[in-house]
Amino acid sequence: MKYGICTLALVPLRSEQAHRSEMVSQVLFGELFEILDAQPDWTAIRMLETDYLGWIQNGQFMAVDAADIAQYFAGKPDIVGREGGLLFNGESRLHLCHGTKLYLNEANRVTLGELALTYQGSVNAFSRADFETEVAQLAMSYKDTPYLWGGRSQWGIDCSGFSQLIYSCFGINLPRDAYQQAEIGDNVDFVSEIRTGDLAYFDNAEGRITHVGIMLDRDTIIHASAKVRIDRMDNEGIFNRELNKYSHKLRIVKRYN
């Protein structure tokens, strides 16, 4: 198998090998993937952490071998903190978004083959033990972030990218899409039993799960819909006060820790 790793801060992952095609997700710096099909301008890939498939433009990643991978992952794993950070050397400046995972050596550097970059910036301080006390505040720091289909950062995010990102800061890895996230975790059978940080899922008219949000308490949810917003939720679903109607129909609530 052949592998690649993203060498830019944040790049599109597209459904087809064209700029005009749908952006299904994004690839962050340092994320590793399997190369499935290399074409002159685009490469089909499979993300190793999530099995997500798509096309990345050539020039936005570097091919790596087993030695490169071992060298990189020998570093200490850290996550870029909420304030972001910078990777730099004499030629490059990469402004990294919150949630980017880095493997830093003792000199606080990322080494990928001949590429060596020093990290300067914030580091995520949360662990799984902090989830119940800190998840709401971290999620609310994203309020008013614009919705972006396929987005995974504070510059634009979709509903499942939001839940995936927030959970990753507490060492909980979720799949990419809402319906995939709903397939794991433990059911919360009653709205009255909801805890801070539980994920609520919503389906469309065909019964397909298409939306997810993070519960701030048993009747308040934060979710990405046009923007990251806070709404009321009950047994029926999310009630949007601005529209004076229910915007999403509740399907299930899940707990992951």
Image (tube, rainbow, N blue to C red):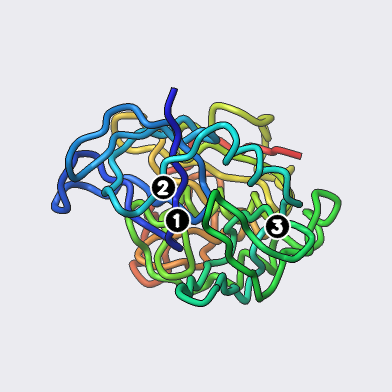
Whichever of callouts 1 and 3 sits on the residue coming sooner in the sequence is: 1
Residue 19 position, x and y percent, is 17, 53
Kind of residue at disc 2: Met
Q: Are marks 1 and 2 in contact (CB under 8 Å)?
A: yes
Is the C terminus in the top left, top right, bottom left or bottom right quadrant? top right
- Give me the disc on residue 113: none
Q: Is residue 144 something that shows in the picture?
A: no
Q: List the residue tagged with mark 2.
A: 62
> In the image, what residue occupies the spot 42% across and 60% down?
8
Tag 3's secondary structure? strand
Q: In the depicted view, which residue is nearer to us: 29 or 156? A: 29
Residue 73 position, x and y percent, is 67, 43
Q: In the depicted view, which residue is nearer to us: 136 or 82? A: 82
Q: Is residue 67 something that shows in the picture?
A: yes
Q: Are marks 3 and 2 in contact (CB under 8 Å)?
A: no
Which residue lies most toward the front here? 114
- Give me the disc on residue 104: 3
> In the image, what residue occupies the spot 83% across and 57% down?
130
Q: Residues within 10 Å of mark 3 (few under 14, many from 20)?
A: many
